[in-house]
Image (cartoon, rainbow, N blue to C red):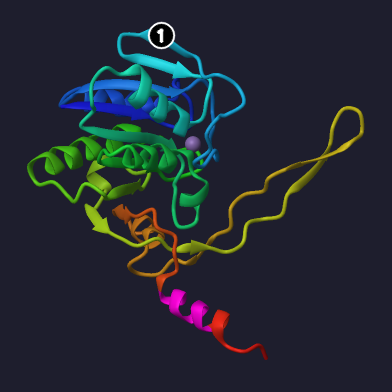
Amino acid sequence: MKILVSNDDGYQAYGLRCLAAALSEIAEVWVVAPDRNRSGASNSLTLDVPLRVHQVDDRIYYVNGTPTDCVHVAITGVLDFEPDMVVSGINHGSNLGDDTLYSGTVAAAMEGRFLGYPAIAVSLAGDRPSHFEAAADLTRELITRLERDPLPRDTILSVNVPDLPRDRIRGWAATRLGFRHRSEPVVAIRDPKGRPAYWIGPAGAGQDAGPGTDFHAVAEGWASLTPLKIDLTHHAQVAELQQWLTAPEG
Ligand code: MN
């Protein structure tokens, strides 16, 4: 098996190193990851400058681009083979609920899926998470299971692991995305010249975070496994919208 590994925290991130090491036990691992932290990059592509790919070690490359750029360039330009799977992470911090829309970690997996490969995004919960080896072990076990017993190819799996030692993680739970309260306001600062500037504030706490959600599973010590799809259409509203378009106004 050949696995393409990427992330959004940059090619030097500890989470990526742990993931690559664990997956190397079961596959040939190729790392193509951003040159620096690109968390929050979502599905962005770089279109205004060329992408340069630097090889730093055997099968390890960094790119001056986003996570999506990395997977795109790797699969369509750099690798001379088809990977069996694209795995992104391990992110330093959870990607729960609406985080999924902003996440570069999830985006790298999505790009793998767009290009036709099974894809997994892995995130470790916590502000300063530390149990990366546990999350990497779980991911390796998950992939071993998927090899024996594959899921439909168009599934993207988003994994969120609680920041606990392996023996305190209760197991896997299939979940749906919850959602957060609105995020905290921006933090206003002054730059050295006295001009106002802003830091994006932290994400809100879980709002829809009850049983069955990714938030709940992680809070209860389970490794959360959420199947994602790309189609954002609100299917139930299409017919209603057509009615609204065709009905007389007022
Ligand atoms: Mn990140």
**Outermost residue toward the left?**
148
Whether residue 15 can be seen here: no
Identify the residue under disc 1.
56
Asked whether residue 189 is drawn in magenta, I would say no
Quarter of the image for the N terminus: give it.
top left
> Along the horizontal axis of the image, is 82 left or right of 190?
left
| Badge 1 residue CB within 8 Å of ligand 1 | no
The residue positioned 26% from the left and 38% from the top of the image is 117
Front residue of 69/13: it is 69
The magenta region covers 236-243
Front residue of 180/147: it is 147
Whether residue 34 can be seen here: yes
Front residue of 200/169: it is 200
Asked whether residue 240 is drawn in magenta, I would say yes
Q: Residue 228 location, x and y as percent?
A: 34, 54
The residue positioned 44% from the left and 60% from the top of the image is 232
Q: Residue 53 location, x and y as percent?
A: 45, 14
Q: Main secondary structure of the magenta part?
A: helix
Quarter of the image for the C terminus: give it.
bottom right
Q: Quadrant of residue 48?
A: top right
Amino acid marked by disc 1: Val
Q: Residue 247 location, x and y as percent?
A: 57, 87
The residue positioned 50% from the left and 14% from the top of the image is 52
